[in-house]
Image: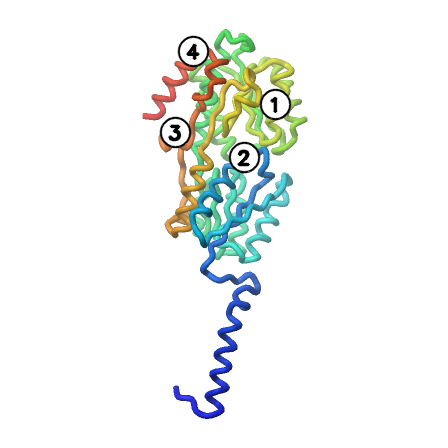
Amino acid sequence: MKFSGTSAVLRIIMVIVVILMVPSLLAAGGIRETSEYRIAVFIPGVTAGSPIYEMLAQGVQRAADEYDHVRANIIEGGTNQGEWADKIAAIAAQGAHDLIVTSNPAMPEIVNEISQQFPQQKFVVMDGFLEGNPSIYTLRYNQYQQAYLAGYFAGLVTASSMEQANSRLKIGLVAGQEYPDMNRSILPGFTDGAADAAGEIEVDFRVVGNWYDASRGKELARDMINAGADVLLPVAGGANYGVLEAAIEYGAYVIWYDTSGYSKAPGVIIGSTAIAQDESTYHTIVRAIEGDLPFGQADQAGISEHAVRFVDDDPLFSEHVPEQIRSALQERITQLSQ
């Protein structure tokens, strides 16, 4: 098209004005320039003092730091689970982040509902499982294997002559809440592992009702110890510390879950299972940044992928657990790794 005279000048001026307005238009209403890749890390709780969430944030930040155009924003959701959905929905509504990353077995269901309102928003949920939603990628650690390791060790201990072990062959699991992975994987894995190590054994299972009430955790653990449980596995978030306090006061052993806990109470915490949340998150986010993450897919990683392990390389483990038990545990781990 050819322009001439005053009309041509006016059209050129209009084009220049539009070009100058583009950056402002992109910044308005949550619309962004595509050169920057922004990640929101939603912590369903608080980061400090929560090793799983600390590792989540570290893994995302490590990935972001390797790219000049990537920015990560850590957002804490607080301990009121009823507010998590609204807070994540608010983040998605802003349209300011290419990816929202979170971690918790309860989160897939929450983000699945939110994604129906904001189908363009991409989500990554670590330590969760949901397949088929093209907006969501999840990676679940093999909770059955992890709980099995804890149960096998608990069975070895309760059947031993260690100081706090009694003749009841009774152990306990304290959960923050009942949820699918707890009922389908963790409790069965813990029970099966204990039975394989000690034969007929009783597992006392109790639920706090939330992920933060340490007083309630202590109360439940005290009752379990008084009823004969001598090894306790808490999977209850902040309530874990109430379970630990009861074990210290009333005489029982504790197995820490998801991270190494030996230094928190040497001689009381005598075992730990761990997940590689930081490494797994890092590799997952790199794939997302590079455009290689298969959204809609749900993956699982366990012992053979080095994503789940029993922490047996801490000096406190060797110091407080007899060699016979350590050897029996290692033999079983070797069998499971093949």
Label 4 Cα crowd, 10 Å radius (few <14 / some 14-19 / many 20+): few
58 sits left or right of 75 in the view: left
Q: Is residue 96 above or below residue 84?
A: below
Task: Kindly identify which residue carries mark 3.
Answer: 303
- CB under 8 Å between discs 1 and 3: no
How far from the left and from the top, in percent, is residue 308? 42, 30
115 sits left or right of 335 in the view: right
Label 3 Cα crowd, 10 Å radius (few <14 / some 14-19 / many 20+): many
Badge nearest the viewer, 1 or 2 = 1
Tell me the residue at 52%/21% (across/down): 262
Tell me the residue at 55%/28% (across/down): 235
Tell me the residue at 59%/13% (across/down): 228
Q: Amino acid at mark 2?
A: Tyr
Measure the alpha-carbon separation of dots 3 and 4: 23 Å
How far from the left and from the top, in percent, is residue 59? 47, 41
Q: Which element type, helix, strand or loop, lies under badge 3?
A: loop
Marked residue nearer the N-terminal end (1 or 4) = 1
Task: Kindly identify which residue carries mark 4.
Answer: 323
Q: Is residue 79 above or below residue 134?
A: above
Label 1 Cα crowd, 10 Å radius (few <14 / some 14-19 / many 20+): many
Badge nearest the viewer, 2 or 4 = 4
Task: Kindly identify which residue carries mark 2.
Answer: 179
Marked residue nearer the N-terminal end (2 or 3) = 2
- CB under 8 Å between discs 2 and 3: no
Q: Amino acid at mark 1?
A: Val
Whether residue 111 is visible: yes
Q: Amino acid at mark 4?
A: Glu
